[in-house]
């Protein structure tokens, strides 16, 4: 909701956007709260089931159906003339479409179809790294991962190249997108279907590819910001492990170095510094209150948060088209317009939750529950075969 506020400033209060961000950057605040929560929740989902296959089935039906709706919505806005697509959609459609299908477009120098989609690339990078670490048996090294990403951000972000792989023409971009997609697809296939040795090879291929993209192919928001985002997510994971007793409380002191690194990296931008501090304070408050019953409207916002994230750019692009000169609108009227934007947005989110997100997640859970007995039976059969061969 805070990210929506920042993005609503452009079509409603363009004159206030930069002054507000200079004091407090609401977009970075919202993004970092999200990534802390994601780092806390997502590994627990993977480790609770103990199945990489179930994790990816769950993630697919959680993310891609509504993502497809967002993509189709942006295409519709472009078709009716309410928005315009990046010129590369005309000259590099295969590379752009394939990169978006993997959700790693922001790490392959591909312009995002909707402005918010850049964060999904870092979320996907996190999922892939978690998969690799879980497969290799090093998934509990969350604190070390958080500190490593923070250290590289502090020590090396100013020296790291930007778009080293993808820049240089349409052919080069297509090659990078195809190679990255093929390597990651093969790595995931090996992890999901291969024997133990092949799974390890696949995990190394996944981790190596993602780390390479993070190191030399980030164009937006920038090397230190991207690395700091990964540090933030792994910090959330470390705090989850502290709470569940997997780590001692001394890890909290190590994790505290991550926001301190962020404050130092953002030393030239007060708005981002305050956003980082506020995000961590918000997460701390949430942890403190986590055993209390939350108001129903707040938990409902949590349910539809993905819809809020993906649908608000479409709505605000429409507002920008219908209101080409917002400064001509009296200032007293603009809060009413903002309330109307939120009302329409939440109404749309209720629909997409009911008709897209909930059915997709239900289907994912059904597929997982149907696959688990088959895997258990397969394991039993394998064990019996091994006993028989020994006999």
Image (cartoon, rainbow, N blue to C red):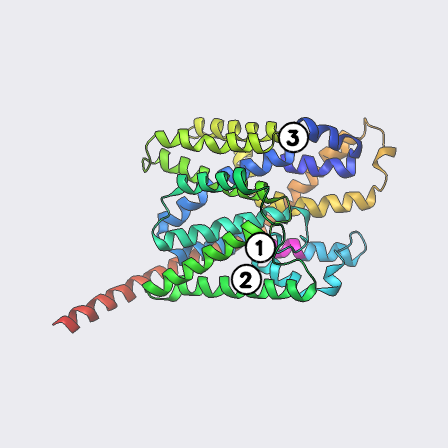
Decide which of 65, 228 is in the foreground and name it: 228
Asked if residue 235 is positioned above or below residue 310 in the image, the reply reads above
Left or right: where 374 falls relative to 297: left
- Residue designated by label 1: 104
Mark 1–mark 2 contact, CB under 8 Å?
A: yes
Dot 2 crowding, Cα within 10 Å, few <14, some 14–19, many 20+? many
SS of the residue at dot 1? loop
Left or right: where 358 falls relative to 134: right
- Residue designated by label 2: 180
* Quarter of image, res 191: bottom left
Decide which of 255, 26 is in the foreground and name it: 255
Residue 68 falls inside the magenta stretch: yes
Q: Residue at x 35, y 29 (%)?
A: 250
Magenta extent: 64-71
Asked if residue 217 is positioned above or below residue 233 in the image, the reply reads below
Dot 1 crowding, Cα within 10 Å, few <14, some 14–19, many 20+? many
Q: Which residue is most to the left? A: 391
For the question of whether residue 295 can be seen, the reply is no
- Residue designated by label 3: 269
Dot 3 crowding, Cα within 10 Å, few <14, some 14–19, many 20+? some
Decide which of 74, 173 is in the foreground and name it: 173
Q: Which residue is drawn at 50% across and 42% down?
A: 152
Asked if residue 72 is positioned above or below residue 152 in the image, the reply reads below
Residue 58: image location, x then y, percent: 46, 54
């Amino acid at each position: 909701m805070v990210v929506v506020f920042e993005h609503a400033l452009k079509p409603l209060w363009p004159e206030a956007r930069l002054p507000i961000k200079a004091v407090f950057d609401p977009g970075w605040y919202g993004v970092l709260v999200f990534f802390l929560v994601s780092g806390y929740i997502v590994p627990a989902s993977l480790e609770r089931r103990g199945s990489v296959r179930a994790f990816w089935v769950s993630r697919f039906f959680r993310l891609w159906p509504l993502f497809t709706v967002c993509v189709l919505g942006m295409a519709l806005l472009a078709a009716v003339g309410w928005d315009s697509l990046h010129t590369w959609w005309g000259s590099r459609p295969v590379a752009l479409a394939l990169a978006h299908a993997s959700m790693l477009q922001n790490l392959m120098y591909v312009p995002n179809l909707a402005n918010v989609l850049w964060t999904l690339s870092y979320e996907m990078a996190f999922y892939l790294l978690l998969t690799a670490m879980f497969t290799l048996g090093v998934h509990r090294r969350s604190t070390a991962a958080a500190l490593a990403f923070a250290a590289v951000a502090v020590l090396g972000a100013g020296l790291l190249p930007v778009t080293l792989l993808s820049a240089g023409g349409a052919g080069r971009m297509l090659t990078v997108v195809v190679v990255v997609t093929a390597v990651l697809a093969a790595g995931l296939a090996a992890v999901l279907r291969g024997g133990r040795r092949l799974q390890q090879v696949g995990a190394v291929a996944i981790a190596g590819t993602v780390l390479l993209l993070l190191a030399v192919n980030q164009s937006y928001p920038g090397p230190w910001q991207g690395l700091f985002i990964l540090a933030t997510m792994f910090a959330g994971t470390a705090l989850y492990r502290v709470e569940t007793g997997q780590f001692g409380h001394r890890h909290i002191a190590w994790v505290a170095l991550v926001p301190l690194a962020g404050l130092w990296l953002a030393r030239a931008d007060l708005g981002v510094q305050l956003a980082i501090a506020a995000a961590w304070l918000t997460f701390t408050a949430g942890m403190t209150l986590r055993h209390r019953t939350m108001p129903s409207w707040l938990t409902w916002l949590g349910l539809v948060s993905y819809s809020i994230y993906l649908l608000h750019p479409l709505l605000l692009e429409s507002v920008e088209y219908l209101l080409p000169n917002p400064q001509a609108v009296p200032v007293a009227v603009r809060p009413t317009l903002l309330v109307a934007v939120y009302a329409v947005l939440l109404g749309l989110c209720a629909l997409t939750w009911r008709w897209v997100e909930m059915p997709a997640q239900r289907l994912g859970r059904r597929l997982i529950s149907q696959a688990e007995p088959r895997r258990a039976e397969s394991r039993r059969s394998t064990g019996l075969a091994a006993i028989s061969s020994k006999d």
